Amino acid sequence: MNDSNDLLSALRAAVGAQQVLTHEDPATDLAAYEQDWRRRHRGRALAVVRPGNTAEVAAVVQACAAAGVAIVPQGGNTGLVVGSVPDASGQQVLLSLQRMNRVRALDAANLTLTVDAGCILQAAQQAAEAAGLLLPLSLAAEGSCTIGGNLASNAGGTQVLRYGNAREQCLGLEVVTPQGEVWDGLIGLRKDNTGYDLRDLYIGSEGTLGIITGATLKLQPQPAAKLTAWAALPSIEAAVELLGLAQRQLGAGLTGFEAMSRFSLSLVDKHYPQLRVPLWQDHPWCVLLENSDSESEAHARERFEALLEAALEQGCVSDAIVAESLGQAHNLWHIRESISLAQSEEGLNIKHDISLPVSAIARFCAETDAQLAAEIPGVRLVNFGHLGDGNLHYNVQAPEGGDPAAFLREQESRINHIVFDSVRRHGGSISAEHGIGSLKAETLPQYKHPVALALMRRIKAALDPQGLMNPGRVLIQEPR
């Protein structure tokens, strides 16, 4: 193939003309595919290709490999690090997996669910629930994010504390390699010690090593009862103390532990007053706890109330409420999940998805808060996240009355440097669950061990020697 017309012809032959979208058709609007969710970047694709099955994905990859054209895989396009949209060259093929949305099989005895990569997370959750089982991966974007994207980014969410990241919830994968071969690794085994774990290689690779087209996921029994509590606390140190107490008293029953600063909740109250945020005005922090019990609701409530009584006596909790119904519990979780939307309503902000040892979180917050306040008077911190697994969304908002766009443009590099250096001093990671994408690709070499980076580059070169899989993501090209 010598030009783009030959490639487009081959793509149409592979998936059907209606599933190859280009700018040649003035009636076709590709904005939903070419712009990232945060509206940080708008690219331009040579074509958007929408295969309907794994064989068609393989044919698309083979055609692109023959033409030497890069491929950008995309699921629900809900990522936050600009990892699934094309660059501005107009020369990359965007491969959308949205049509590959089937639930392939559910094995109740083996507690596994096999789905297409384009299956929406919520649809996978509902399939498990219909069988009386639980898929515990839970994200704010679960109504639009896809399983393939969840695995490619090793998504986290609100139940990592008990069930682990997406990686821990996956048993097998189906992957199309950069050469267009299909690896069928859709096994449902908990034990398979027959060599290198290719599954773990592709999970978290952000589409840079191959394209995930299917997955076999672990399921869990549904808990007999699930209770939610909302606690007000005097400090982040108290939140860490409460976490330790909850882990000791609830054990594996503690399935959620979300911390939210007063300012983050004030944004929800300001932009979504109908949500009626409880207890936030008089307390620096609030925590949302979830207790899943295998016995009964009465047993769960007894243990929960005993925990909160002990926390009140110790002084790490100032006030607390336990949801009296599923509706109340849903409302409390909806408040937590609305923080990101509320800060977007407030204006552009500088996002950080960081992880730290739980023991270092209070010290990190105190030191970094103080440094940012000294460097940029009036700066506002939207600090919240999955404290139970050490993951904070440590976001920085412009001073009151400032221009958010100008703040982002002028201060992002400086603020990132302050935050990431502090993360490193406290033994943390600059990306907990969002990934690297293109947004952090140039920053990664400053904070990743050089030997680890060298090994990653060797893996990339071995599996994708043409460099056609999602280029510019995770690893930037080394200067020649």
Image (cartoon, helix red, strand yellow):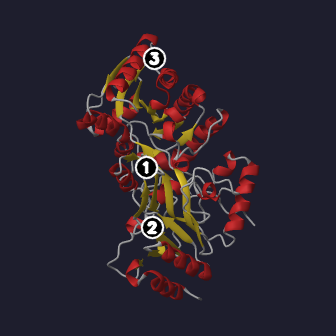
Q: Secondary structure at mark 3?
A: loop
Q: Which residue is mark 2?
A: 97
Q: What number is the disc on residue 316?
A: 3
Residue drawn 35% across the image and 31% down it: 228
Camera-side residue of 415 and 268: 268
* Kind of residue indicated by mark 3: Cys
Q: Earlier in the sequence, mark 1 or mark 3?
A: 3
Which quarter of the rendering shows the C terminus?
A: bottom right
Camera-side residue of 219 and 143: 219
Q: Secondary structure at mark 2?
A: loop
Question: Picture coordinates of residue 213 (x, y %)?
Answer: 50, 66
Question: Picture coordinates of residue 434 (x, y %)?
Answer: 52, 49
Which quarter of the rendering shows the N terminus?
A: bottom right
Q: Earlier in the sequence, mark 1 or mark 2?
A: 2
In the image, is 297 to the left or to the right of 370?
Answer: left
- Residue placed farthest to the left in the image? 274
Q: Nearer the viewer, mark 1 or mark 3?
A: 3
Is 337 rendered above or below residue 378? below
In the image, is 340 to the left or to the right of 178?
Answer: left
Circles 1 and 3: CB atoms closer than 8 Å: no
Circles 2 and 3: CB atoms closer than 8 Å: no
Residue drawn 50% across the image and 32% down it: 388
Question: Picture coordinates of residue 446 (x, y %)?
Answer: 68, 47
Q: Nearer the viewer, mark 1 or mark 2?
A: 2
* Kind of residue indicated by mark 2: Leu
Residue 128 visible to the viewer: yes
Residue 87 visible to the viewer: no
Q: Nearer the viewer, mark 2 or mark 3?
A: 2
Question: Picture coordinates of residue 451 (x, y %)?
Answer: 76, 50
* Kind of residue indicated by mark 1: Ala
Q: Earlier in the sequence, mark 2 or mark 3?
A: 2
Q: CA distance from mark 1 to mark 3?
A: 38 Å
